[in-house]
Image (spheres, rainbow, N blue to C red):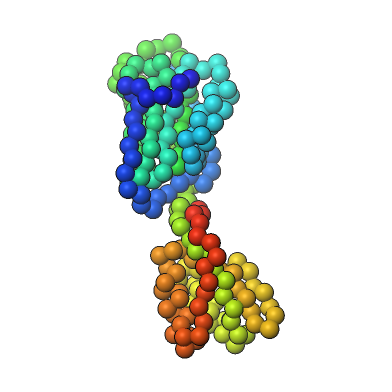
Amino acid sequence: MTFGLGFNECYNISMRQPYQVPLNEVRREHAAFNSRFIATLAAAFSVEEARAFVSRIRKEFSDATHNVPAYVIGGGNTVLEYSSDDGEPAGTAGRPALTVLRGSGLGDAVLVVTRYFGGTLLGAGGLVRAYTEAAQLAVNAVRRGQRVTVNLALLAIPYHLLERVRLLSARHRGEILDEDFAADITLTLQFPVSEFDGFQLGLRELSAGKLQAEVIETKETISAV
């Protein structure tokens, strides 16, 4: 299979926003006039991961009539998109699958709809409907997570402030990853970037300006929604 640009393939790149991603791999099957349509959906965080997934499904279903891929890498308004009809009439397979992904709210997602021909020609409209319905079954079944940017931070506090800092952290969607008890308590915390400044402000108010968390890493992570 060639992944170069073609008449039925689409790429779009623009500004990035928060978005949801698949948390698990799912597979659902749909039947239409004796043809089997098997939709397999999973997360892919790069074009290379998406291509590897497509190759794996093609190998698994090497005897199928078609293995139609579609994927979106990135999310929100920053998306790289791809689809292919894989031998089906132009616009009847890859494009409908990609349209379902676009409408799902998912990013970093790859989908392959496998078809076993059942002997009855479906026509263009029937193919569009069958590939759309198979893709929707997979999209509706997948568990979702939220891809967010977080700050990992260290904070040393006196013992008497521990419970108050725990409550403050929770109010700002923070997670305490570790507590090290020595002369002071050293906390390892994780916050969504959007909540971190609010935590720091609350911390200053709590300690009369004496305490401040130190950011040691900013990264992307996925949390369940």
Q: Residue at x 55, y 16 (%)?
A: 63
Relative vertical location of residue 111 with respect to residue 211 in this rendering, above or below: above
Viewer-nearest residue: 223 or 150: 150
Q: How many marks?
A: 0
**Residue at point 46%, 52% (across, down):** 147
**Observer able to see residue 209:** yes
Q: Is residue 30 visible?
A: no
Q: Identify the residue shown where x is 45% and y is 74%.
A: 199
Residue 159 percent coordinates (x, y):
62, 85
Q: Residue furthest left?
A: 125
Task: Find residue 2 and report its horizontal and vertical position in percent.
Answer: 45, 21
Look at the picture and state if 1 lies above or below 47. Answer: above
Residue placed most toward the observer, 153 or 142: 153
Which of 143/14 is in front? 14
Quadrant position of residue 102: top left
Comparing 115 with 195, the one in front is 195
> Does residue 122 lie above or below 194 as drawn?
above
Look at 52% across and 36% down and name the residue there: 49
Residue situated furthest top in the rendering: 119
Residue 88 % position (x, y):
38, 17
